[in-house]
């Protein structure tokens, strides 16, 4: 009779290690989606919109990317 609680605790540990060590089960905070490569022109537009680069630099880099 004493072995039933021990088996329950053992099963809980096994489930915990299976999820955390082998990456199965629900992921909490992990991004399971493959990362898509971002379009360099979109990144350039975002930088220009944030004011990180000026209009001249934007136009120059845009021409380089469109080649």
Image (cartoon, rainbow, N blue to C red):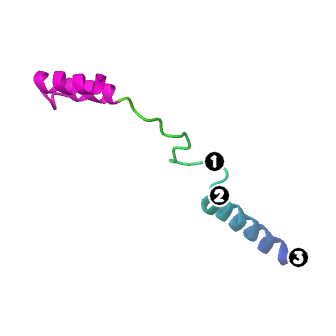
Residue 26, label in figure: 1
- Say which quadrant the C terminus sits in: top left
Image location (x, y in percent) of residue 53 = 15, 30
Pointers 2 and 1 in contact (CB under 8 A)?
Answer: yes
- Could you say which quadrant of the image residue 54 lies in? top left
Q: Would you say the magenta stretch is mainly helix, strand or loop?
A: helix
For the residue carrying disc 3, how many other residues have a C-alpha within 10 Å: few (<14), some (14-19), or many (20+)? few
Alpha-carbon distance for marks 2 and 1? Answer: 8 Å
Q: What residue does disc 2 label?
A: 19
- Could you say which quadrant of the image residue 9 lies in? bottom right
For the residue carrying disc 2, how many other residues have a C-alpha within 10 Å: few (<14), some (14-19), or many (20+)? few
- Say which quadrant the N terminus sits in: bottom right
Alpha-carbon distance for marks 3 and 1? Answer: 33 Å
Q: Which residues are magenta?
A: 40-67
Alpha-carbon distance for marks 3 and 2? Answer: 29 Å
- Residue at (26% x, 28% y) in the render: 44
- Residue at (11% x, 23% y) in the render: 56
Name the foreground residue: 14 vs 36.
Answer: 36
Q: What residue does disc 3 label?
A: 1
Q: Which numbered disc, 3 or 1, marks the residue closer to the eye?
A: 1
Of mark 3 and mark 2, the one earlier in the sequence is 3
Image location (x, y in percent) of residue 33 = 54, 39
User: Please, what secondary structure does the residue beneath circle 1 have?
Assistant: loop
Magenta includes 21?
A: no
Residue 6, label in figure: none
User: Please, what secondary structure does the residue beneath circle 3 have?
Assistant: loop
Magenta includes 65?
A: yes
Q: Which numbered disc, 3 or 2, marks the residue closer to the eye?
A: 2
Is the residue 66 above or below the residue 1 in the image? above
Of mark 3 and mark 1, the one earlier in the sequence is 3
């Amino acid at each position: 009779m004493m072995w039933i609680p021990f088996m329950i605790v053992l099963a809980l540990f096994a489930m915990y290690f299976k999820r955390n060590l082998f990456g199965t089960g629900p992921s909490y905070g992990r991004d399971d989606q493959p990362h898509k490569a971002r379009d360099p022109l979109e990144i350039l537009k975002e930088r220009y919109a944030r004011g990180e680069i000026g209009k001249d630099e934007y136009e120059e880099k845009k021409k380089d990317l469109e080649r």
